[in-house]
């Protein structure tokens, strides 16, 4: 997450600095009064006693007013969505592109990111993580307060805001979220979810999950997956849809033999990986010779199977250099650092 590190607002009374300043001011009043007392001490004792009692009453009154005024200052505390609301899905709404958080490009930790001009047609698989209490109440990249109980997400390159339909490929749970932040910037993660989003997708415990992410066009609801439509309709009614009611597209269904295994047939005990194949991709080349040259270099150092797969796009043929298949997200993570040390700047965890 790329957040403006503003101090987290405090509730109730003023902060320590404010209190210290006010009590210093009261102290100065006391010093002044004491000086008056010493001046009067040279003349007569009786006027001093009366004056000192009067000043003592005034001093107590000032102290009470200052402290009471401090404790009554309203605190700019973020009021989060109530967790009892069931973490309702975001409702896609046509919004202008955010004034903040949408530079053409930006650099984080030595890597350059190019912000997309449009999210239309975005559809990708990868690893999701989540972020929560440490950022709650701080500003997101588009200058909104981060609410860990809201259905939001962070992405490195999608325009802000973007609405997404996110499916956990390991348990089939799905959610609609609104992207209002930048990140994640660690371990080749695809997307960072709020605590609410992680809870809905069932990844708050393990911390990561394999997900499929699809952009939703608020101006064209007919183009949404049926599962997203069900979730949004329920959110508009003020409720939620049971995850078993959300239709899972065939592209996400678990293959078993020659058929497609239904949700009811998926074992109730979640597994870190279902039948989805996990790889670390180190590059996609237009020239196969370049891919083969890098493969030979990496295979001489890393004892992990490395293959070249061919994909045909509308414009050209690409040769993807990948390590795997791998048995877990943790195995993929362990490859990232050695690849960085070998000069591979942008290894990606991909899911087939």
Image (tube, rainbow, N blue to C red):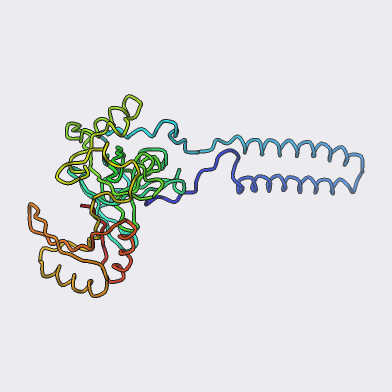
Q: In this view of the protein, which residue sits in the foreground, 224 or 28?
A: 224
Residue at the spot x=37%, y=45% of the render? 203
Residue 152 picture location, percent across and down: 35, 41
Residue at the spot x=23%, y=42% of the render? 214
Position of 217 with respect to 46 (left or right) is: left
Q: Residue furthest top?
A: 237
Can you say whether 264 is above or below 280 in the image? above
Q: How many marks?
A: 0
Residue 281 picture location, percent across and down: 22, 60
Position of 18 with respect to 227 (left or right) is: right
Can you say whether 222 is above or below 272 in the image? above
Position of 135 with respect to 110 (left or right) is: right
Residue 327 picture location, percent across and down: 29, 57
Position of 295 with respect to 183 (left or right) is: left
Q: Residue furthest front?
A: 257
Q: In this view of the protein, which residue sits in the foreground, 104 or 265?
A: 265
Residue 171 image-quadrant placement: top left
Residue 204 picture location, percent across and down: 40, 45
């Amino acid at each position: 997450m790329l957040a403006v590190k503003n101090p987290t607002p405090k509730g109730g009374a003023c902060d320590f600095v404010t209190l210290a300043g006010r009590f210093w001011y009261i102290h100065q009043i006391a010093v002044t009064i004491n000086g008056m007392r010493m001046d009067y001490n040279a003349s007569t004792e009786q006027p001093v006693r009366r004056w000192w009692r009067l000043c003592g009453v005034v001093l107590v009154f000032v102290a009470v007013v200052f402290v009471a005024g401090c404790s009554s200052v309203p605190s700019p505390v973020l009021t989060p969505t109530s967790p009892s609301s069931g973490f309702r899905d975001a409702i896609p709404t046509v919004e202008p592109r955010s004034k903040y958080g949408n530079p053409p490009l930006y650099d984080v930790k030595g890597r350059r990111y190019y912000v997309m001009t449009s999210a239309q047609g975005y559809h990708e698989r990868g690893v999701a993580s989540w972020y929560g209490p440490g950022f709650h109440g701080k500003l997101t990249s588009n200058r909104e307060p981060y609410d860990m109980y809201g259905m939001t997400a962070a992405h490195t390159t999608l325009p802000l805001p973007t609405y997404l339909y996110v499916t956990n490929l390991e348990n089939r749970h799905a959610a609609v979220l609104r992207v209002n932040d930048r990140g994640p910037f660690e371990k080749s993660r695809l997307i960072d979810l709020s605590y609410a989003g992680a809870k809905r997708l069932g990844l708050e415990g393990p911390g990561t999950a394999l997900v499929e992410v699809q952009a939703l066009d608020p101006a064209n609801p007919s183009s949404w997956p049926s599962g997203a439509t069900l979730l949004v309709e329920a959110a508009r009614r003020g409720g939620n849809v049971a995850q078993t009611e959300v239709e899972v597209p065939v592209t996400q269904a678990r293959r078993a033999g020659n058929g497609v295994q239904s949700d009811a047939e998926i074992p109730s005990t979640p597994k870190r990986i279902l039948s989805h194949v996990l790889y670390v991709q180190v590059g996609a080349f237009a020239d196969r010779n370049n891919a083969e040259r890098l493969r030979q270099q990496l295979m001489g150092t890393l004892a992990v199977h490395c293959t070249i797969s061919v994909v045909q796009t509308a414009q050209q043929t690409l040769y993807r250099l990948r390590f795997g298949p791998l048995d877990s997200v943790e195995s993929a993570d362990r490859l990232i650092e050695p690849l960085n040390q070998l000069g591979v700047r942008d290894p990606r965890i991909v899911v087939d």
